[in-house]
Image (cartoon, helix red, strand yellow):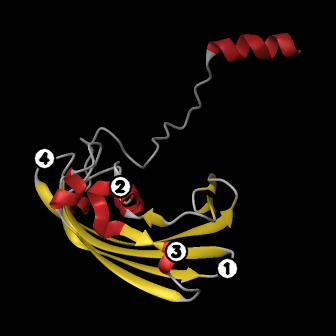
Amino acid sequence: MDSKDYREFEINIMQLDNSRHEFNFELDTAFFQSFPESLIENGKGKAFLAIEKSETMMQFDFEIKLRVELVCDVSLEKFDHPIDLKKEIIFKFGDEYKELSEDLRVIPGSTASINVAEFIYEFANLAIPMKKIHPKLAEEDRPDLAYSDEVEDSGEEEIDPRWEVLKKLKK
């Protein structure tokens, strides 16, 4: 992603004093379509960002509320799906950029700005369910689905014959 394409998502952290700062961003279909690998083709909503800055670190608290259009895996009908999530990223000031974990990063103290567009995009896409089932089909018992949360138990445990041979060797 080229950060110059998302100037409205650029946070100039050098100009922020050590206190709390709040930002609001409008999200629309054009935003999600600008990412080539996006799971969201149509969507609209808002992202709220609160930044708590101190001498040694910054805490970014994201709150994202969207309505996205998904296609049902069963009926192929389109339906609206709500996304309402909260995420946190902590940036510590250091000598060089390091991603210590999903929600903890070290950035050089000389970093002038952080573009949050990709964070918002990733959080929203990760909130898309693996199984996209239309709400009107969600309550139905659907044996024709290719996948299921339930594991069938036939009562007998099948053992691979190769394991039986190995068990004999063990004795």
Circle 2 SS class: helix
Is residue 43 toward the left or the right of residue 57 in the image?
A: left
Label ID, residue 14: 3
Tell which circle, 2 or 1, labels the residue nearer the N-terminal end.
2
The amino acid type found where label 3 is placed reads Met
Q: Report the Cα–Cα distance between label 3 and label 1.
A: 11 Å
The amino acid type found where label 4 is placed reads Leu
Q: Are marks 3 and 2 in contact (CB under 8 Å)?
A: no
Q: Are marks 4 and 2 in contact (CB under 8 Å)?
A: no
Question: Label 1 belongs to which residue?
Answer: 55
Q: Nearer the viewer, mark 4 or mark 3?
A: 3
Q: Report the Cα–Cα distance between label 4 and label 2.
A: 35 Å
What residue is shown at x 30% (from left), y 38% (from top)? 146
The amino acid type found where label 2 is placed reads Ser
Q: Report the Cα–Cα distance between label 4 and label 3.
A: 48 Å
Label ID, residue 3: 2
Q: Nearer the viewer, mark 4 or mark 2?
A: 2
Binning the other alpha carbons within 10 Å of mark 4 as few (below 14), some (14 to 19) or many (20 upward) gives: few
Label ID, residue 76: 4
Q: Report the Cα–Cα distance between label 4 and label 1.
A: 52 Å
